[in-house]
Image (cartoon, rainbow, N blue to C red):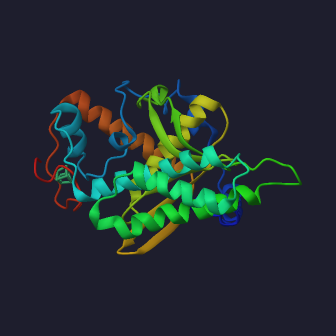
Amino acid sequence: MPLPTHVILKELRKLHLRRFQEPVDEELRGWNWDKPPIRPRAYLGLSVIDAAPYCPTRRDVWLRKAVKVPPELNEQLKVGLTIHEIIHATLKCLRKYVLTTQHPWTTYEDVLEEVMKAVNIPEGMNGWGTQLIKYMIIQTLAEASWNVVGEGATPWLPWISEVRVDGSSLGLSKNLRIDALTGSNILVDFKMGKPCENHKLMVTAYAMALEANLEVPIDYGIIIYVNGVNDSLNIKSEPIYVTSELRKDFIDSRDEVVDMLLSDREPPKAQACIPSCPYRNQC
Ligand code: SF4
């Protein structure tokens, strides 16, 4: 796991206090999908990035959904996709070994070899990409042992990765994919680059989609930022309490996108574009 359980528990303690001081307005729970303000004006099967876009004028969504321009696979996107591939391939591979009696060191070597073969790491992130695989294996093996209680107990992985959820009742896609969910229902989203306001809205969208499906409150998320230079890996986390305010912001953002697409109105170019926008050459 990219974050040890004791770190997550420490973060959770701070969030409990916030939740106590500012409880979530029950009207804004995802299970109220059939009533305003959660009920969408139209069911357009938006992705989470469509409903909480990076572009200040939402022109990226218009290009993608109305003009059908595919995003350009730029360096930043490639690195982001590789980080996700590494994390999911490592967890998938470890799940095979964690229930065996194989020595942890042999497991480390076997998983490292398998993941290195399975993932094509771009040249620029060879060093820190490999460090990420090693770090994930060591953390996960340590967590699996940490969770064993009593002699003869079975090790288990405290996270499930690549969780599928149906977001259609909120006007989102039927096939949303959440990076991971911890045993204590904390939603985990991996990102690269710098923290950005729409990352919190994306976590909120996933939390509300889970509430709509599971009918249990999902109040917490953690965004894990994975970055690196040469051989040096940098992992930071940002715990999120999915407040009423974030929920309203997500609903407003989704509704503005729906209105823009229904009106077929071309949004203007943004005055300040994000450097990594995959539409820079086609906008
Ligand atoms: S290039 Fe700028 S205006 Fe165009 S979609 Fe990207 S951020 Fe928006």
Asked where in the image residue 51 lies, by quadrant, the reply is top left
Extreme-left residue of the structure: 282
Extreme-right residue of the structure: 151
Instruction: Give the left or right position of residue 42, taking residue 157 as reference.
Output: left
Q: Nearer the viewer, residue 153 or 36?
A: 153
Instruction: Give the left or right position of residue 101, taking residue 257 as reference.
Output: right
Name which residue lies at 65% across and 31% down. Answer: 215
Q: Is residue 242 above or below residue 18?
A: above
Q: Position of residue 282 (x, y in %)?
A: 10, 47
Q: Quadrant of the N terminus?
A: bottom right
Q: Nearer the viewer, residue 190 or 158?
A: 158
Q: Position of residue 138 (x, y in %)?
A: 60, 64
Q: Is residue 98 above or below residue 138?
A: above
Q: Is residue 239 visible?
A: no
Q: Position of residue 269 (x, y in %)?
A: 14, 51
Q: Is residue 49 visible?
A: yes
Name which residue lies at 37% across and 66% down. Answer: 194
Name which residue lies at 16% across and 34% down. Answer: 265
Instruction: Give the left or right position of residue 8, taking residue 248 as reference.
Output: right
